[in-house]
Amino acid sequence: MPALVFLGVLFISLWVRRALYNVLERWTNEKKIELGKRVISFIREPLLHWLLILGAYIALQVSVVAEGWKSLGGKILASILIAYVGWVLIQLSKELISFYLDRAKAPKRAVSAAITAIQVAIVIIGITMLLQLWGAPMAPVLIGIVAALVVAILVLREVSSNLISGFLLTQGNQIRIGDLIKLGSGEEGYVKEITWRNTQLATPNGSIIIIPNAKLMQTTIIKYEKPLKMAKEPFHFSTRLHLKELTGLEARNLSQLAKGLEKVPDSVVYFHTHSFLEEHHFLVPEPANDFALWVEDALGYEVLAERLASIDIFEFPTLGALRARIIGIIQDFLSQTPDGREAPAGEEFHFIKSIGVVLPTPYVARDLREFVDMLRRVSIGSLYFHIFESRLRLQRGANDFSVWLEDSLGEKELAEEIARLDPYNYTLENLRGTIIQLCQQKL
């Protein structure tokens, strides 16, 4: 009877083992889980030996051997099984930890420490089970084990937390090298490397962000799946400095103001229509130009001042067209009103020109997402240069952003939406936010 039971248990176990292996191999092949294949291959032979020990144990229990011998034999077989399983787990842990930490590019010292810690834990658990099986006193052993575990947790809690998080990141394959991600805390960049302790992100401006794996697992992660269209030419953000220079020309009445406007360069027209806006960029709507302010304050022509102040600068693609409009309004007023007023002494209108110095910045955008990121970082002066100066002083008829979006990225619709914005009806910060919002909607 014991021999028949042994053979029956062995036959059923082998059949179940074969069916289970077929299912597991098919699943690991479909999911392409390399770690699962290694585990299955490693325990294939030991599992057969475990089944033999199990069959022997059951055969012993149904035999006619005395109960005392049954108990002793059962304990011996159970001890052999515990020792054998522990030995296999020690070898398997070494294989798995080396496999994972080598992929995570962990230092050799860390690999050795992790293997040693796991193997010691397995040995302790095995000894505890053997002592309990043979009835040895467990209280001192358990107290020692608990104390050792508490010390280990306190000393290695950060390392172990990062280690486990790094394992989950790499094995989950949800984040891979080269992915573009954004964290809930705002950091954004391409995944450059995932190590056993941290993950490194390369930002669009070339900086490296190092994030502990445990922290990464605790935050919200946005993974951008859609590849971005790269620009034909990158957008280089610039800024400018302005110097004021007196031209030596002045006006005491409207006639002299109109004649002076005909002579001065465009930089003078630009200065007197934009200087106040640039200095007080937080005011909305746009303040009156210098011509309107002088006509009202120095000459007292309120109607003319109102007409000059109501000029919508956004309507004019060039400074020449804006100059012609201002001169036209003054001459039209002079044709109906005699030029009999002159500014009091000391209140003459002095024509000032603006000398601009354009400076490069380190901010460069190669796609739309980088453009949004850089737009958040650049100064007010850079934003002012690319929106106002490029349109009028450089006579492009459109701001730099719209030109680049259409010509280099092919985003014609987005370029037109930004070009339609009247920048004189926004503060510079509000204008920045509006452009970013339009770009994010496109993204």
Image: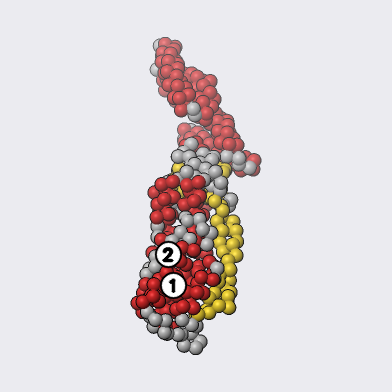
Q: Which one is in front, 394 or 207?
A: 394
Quarter of the image holding residue 14?
Answer: top left
**Mark identifier at residue 313:** 2
Residue at position x 46%, y 78% in the image: 255
Front in this rendered view, residue 176 or 219: 176
Looking at the image, residue 226 sits to the left or right of residue 235; the answer is: left
Q: Is residue 209 above or below residue 310?
A: above
Residue position marked by numbered label 1 in the rendering:
289
Give the vertical position of 2 relative to 80 (above or below). above
**Amino acid type of the residue tagged 2 in the rendering:** Ile
Percent x, y for residue 423?
42, 61
Q: Position of residue 271 (x, y in %)?
A: 51, 70
Label 2 neighbour load within 10 Å: few <14, some 14-19, many 20+: many
Give the residue at x 50% y 80%: 251
- Give neighbour class at mark 1: few <14, some 14-19, many 20+ (Cα, 10 Å): many
Q: Residue at x 56, y 48 (%)?
A: 234
Element marked by disc 2: helix
**Nearest to N terminus: mark 2 or mark 1:** 1
The residue that appears at 43% across and 21% down in the rendered structure is: 23
In the rendered image, residue 76, in percent from the top left (x then y), is placed at: 50, 26
Residues at marks 2 and 1 touching, judged by CB atoms closer than 8 Å: yes
Q: Nearer the viewer, residue 215 or 161?
A: 215
- Locate the N terminus and report the quarter of the image it occupies: top left
